[in-house]
Amino acid sequence: MYLFFHPNVEDRITLDEIESMHCIKVLRHKVGDEIKILNGKGKLFAGAILTDHSRKCEVGELKEIKTQPITRTVHIATAPTKHHDRME
């Protein structure tokens, strides 16, 4: 699942140039395709592409998707090296 970012999600948004190029040129989305958008505040939205221009991709019909909070924890382990000064 590919996610896109836009800080101010409203009824209709325009993705920035980099996000638009990635959506249209790289992933080859077209008008009517549904994409998912994160707002950076923990909310996920789904919307349909209205304009498939590679510099100004417009997305409309945005609906908030209910998400469950992540309850996982992350553990990091490192293997010791022969020379202790390399552990930096």
Image (cartoon, rainbow, N blue to C red):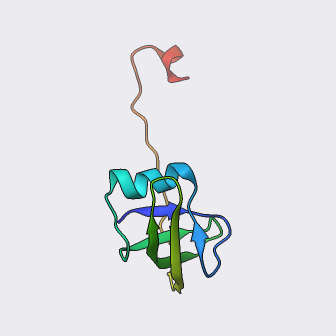
- Place of residue 2 in the rendered image (x, y in percent of width and height, measured from the top left): 39, 62
Q: Quadrant of residue 53?
A: bottom left
The C terminus - image quarter? top right
Q: Quadrant of residue 79?
A: top left
Give the residue displayed 58% in from the left and 55% down from the top: 16
| 27 in relation to 10, above or below | above
| 88 in relation to 13, above or below | above
- Place of residue 21 in the rendered image (x, y in percent of width and height, measured from the top left): 45, 51
Number of disc labels = 0
Residue toward you, 56 or 1:
56
Q: Does 78 sit left or right of 1 as displayed?
A: right
Give the residue displayed 46% in from the left and 68% down from the top: 51
| 16 in relation to 51, above or below | above
- Place of residue 63 in the rendered image (x, y in percent of width and height, measured from the top left): 53, 85
Give the residue displayed 53% in from the left and 82% down from the top: 62
- Residue most toward the left? 28
Q: Does 75 sit left or right of 26 as displayed?
A: right
Residue toward you, 31 or 88:
31
The N terminus - image quarter? bottom left
- Place of residue 56 in the rendered image (x, y in percent of width and height, measured from the top left): 53, 59
| 36 in relation to 56, above or below | below
Residue toward you, 81 or 16:
16
Q: Does 16 sit left or right of 32 as displayed?
A: right
